[in-house]
């Protein structure tokens, strides 16, 4: 370790793709003194130990957070309230608590109910991932060149926010800060809606006659396979996202439904000009994505 | 050239991504004697000549097909009727005519109206492509490991079908044969619907408030960027596909709409179990795609 570590002891609760990648990354970069893994899944614990992903690994989450100056909650969002209640009595008084959940308003609400009132909570969301799950799927470069959004409440200790931001920058991410509600709207359209639609369209294909279904797979290179990749993401994580960002997702879905109707009508009425205009406009957005180096 | 070429003189009409990739591939594999490029776009012609993609290049499509024993129509589907009428008087009596269009019933209907009655027509559709367009985007490996679907009408000369199939196998593709109407239904769900939805969702994002739009691009790595890539495809080609495969697309869109409503309702009613079941089922399809080596 070339410099003073950002945190002496970080407890990462939940060693899925994100948790285990973060462990690998902070260790590779020498950003923390000690890594404690907390995971209730015996198979995950075994993988953590076999791959040596943490200095200690335990199924007891209260034990995991003891003496940690940073706690990273990386479990499915539905488990936050229960995990928060479990660790609350064991948290060091000056510990910083952060998380990696894909929704933020609901996360803050459920953690605030159970954590000690003065807990320095810095909610976070690394915009990174693959369709893989589990501790064996993680890799240290996952956050490289990606965004991490922090959504601290007003009045949060700037030192805590700064330390969490420094950790994410240390693993190669750009850090942005915004209001939790705004985050949830941005992600509803960039992430939640695309996943919902990918799940839907793959489901629609599953319901086709058997003969057609085999061919859908055979000829998937024509566009469908990109949807199957998105729809291969963890079902539990995504169920929780939709349940916990319900209003923003339903709002964006309503807009999408209106737009689908417009295109449907254009196809039915053979309005080629309207289709061409719409498609050309969509193409420009791709240019923006490439220019922003997110392609 | 190690063996007897499959065709002595192939005329490829339309040197976009597919046409120019096919020219590169058949030349690399020594499958044909001579390649004639027919393209009315002066910029495309210049690129063809500069890159040496054909033995001859001309804007006169009738001239291009003269003495060709294989004619590959690779122009946008909307131009088929006019291109067919232009080349009809110049076609060699025993020429085989094929194409690479993404829809097949409409293509057969429009070509049959204008080609000489006995033309040996072998409609084809290579399931390959990128979101790029134009002769400079092509590459010889584009068809490697991909499917090419041929949809000859009943009674087509088996020798003609066999020769076209051999050409596609020669450039690395697997060849399947099916009825044109069935092809159009399979592609409606595997290709046309995914593209339509990608175009729609990117359009929905474009219509958001300006502040949100910049963030949509910034945080696109979370799922949205896959849609922008699909939606970057050629607008003219896709307009033609939707206009020419209207009924199958509208049928699949109707099914998708019903499924969207089901998921929308599950989110509104917080039915986590239903969402989880749906998502898990979608994940299995991904496994099929990987097993079929189309991932």
Image (cartoon, coloured by chain):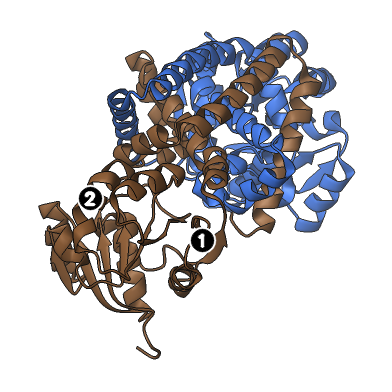
Chain colours: A blue, B brown
Foreground pick, B181 / B268: B181
Identify whether B199 is placed above or below A115.
below
* Relative to A220, B232 lies left or right: left
Q: Which residue lies furthest to the bottom in this view?
A: B2
Residue plotted at (58% across, 23% down)? B254
**The one of B141 and B279 positioned closer to us in this rendering:** B141
The residue at the point 63 percent across, 43 percent down is A131
Circle 1 SS class:
loop
Residue drawn at (82%, 19%), measured in percent from left and top?
Answer: A82
Which numbered tag is attached to residue B85? Answer: 2
Q: How far apart are marks 2 and 1 (CA)?
A: 23 Å
Res. B49 in view: yes
* Quadrant of the rendering where the C terminus of chain A is positioned: top left
Q: Which mark is residue A17?
A: none
Residue identifier under label 1: B155
Left or right of B207 in this view: A228: right
Q: Where is residue B87 in the image (x, y as percent from the top left)?
A: 21, 57
Q: In this view, does B111 lie to the left or right of A244?
A: left
């Amino acid at each position: 370790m070339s410099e003073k570590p950002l945190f002496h002891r970080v407890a990462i609760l939940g060693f899925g793709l994100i948790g285990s990648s973060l462990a690998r990354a902070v260790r590779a970069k020498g950003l923390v003194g000690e890594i404690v893994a907390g995971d209730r899944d015996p198979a995950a614990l075994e993988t953590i130990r076999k791959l040596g992903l943490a200095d200690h690994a335990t199924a007891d989450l209260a034990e995991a957070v003891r003496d940690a100056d940073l706690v990273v909650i990386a479990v499915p969002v539905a488990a936050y309230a229960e995990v928060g209640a479990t660790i609350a009595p064991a948290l060091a008084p000056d510990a910083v608590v952060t998380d990696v959940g894909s929704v933020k308003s609901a996360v803050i609400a459920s953690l605030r109910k159970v954590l000690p009132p003065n807990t320095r909570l810095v909610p976070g969301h690394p915009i990174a991932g693959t369709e893989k799950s589990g501790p064996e799927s993680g890799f240290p470069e996952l956050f490289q060149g990606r965004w991490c959004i922090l959504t601290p409440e007003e009045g949060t200790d700037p030192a805590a926010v700064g330390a969490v931001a420094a950790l994410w920058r240390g693993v190669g991410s750009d850090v942005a800060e915004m209001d939790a509600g705004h985050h949830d709207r941005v992600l509803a359209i960039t992430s939640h809606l695309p996943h919902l639609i990918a799940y839907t369209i793959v489901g629609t294909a599953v319901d086709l006659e058997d003969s057609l279904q085999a061919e859908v797979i055979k000829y998937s290179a024509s566009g469908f396979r990109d949807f199957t990749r998105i729809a291969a993401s963890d079902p539990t994580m995504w169920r929780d996202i939709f349940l916990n960002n319900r209003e923003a997702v339903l709002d964006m879905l309503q807009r999408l439904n209106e737009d689908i109707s417009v295109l449907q009508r254009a196809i039915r009425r053979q309005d080629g000009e309207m289709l061409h205009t719409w498609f050309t406009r969509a193409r420009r957005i791709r240019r923006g994505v490439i220019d922003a180096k997110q392609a």
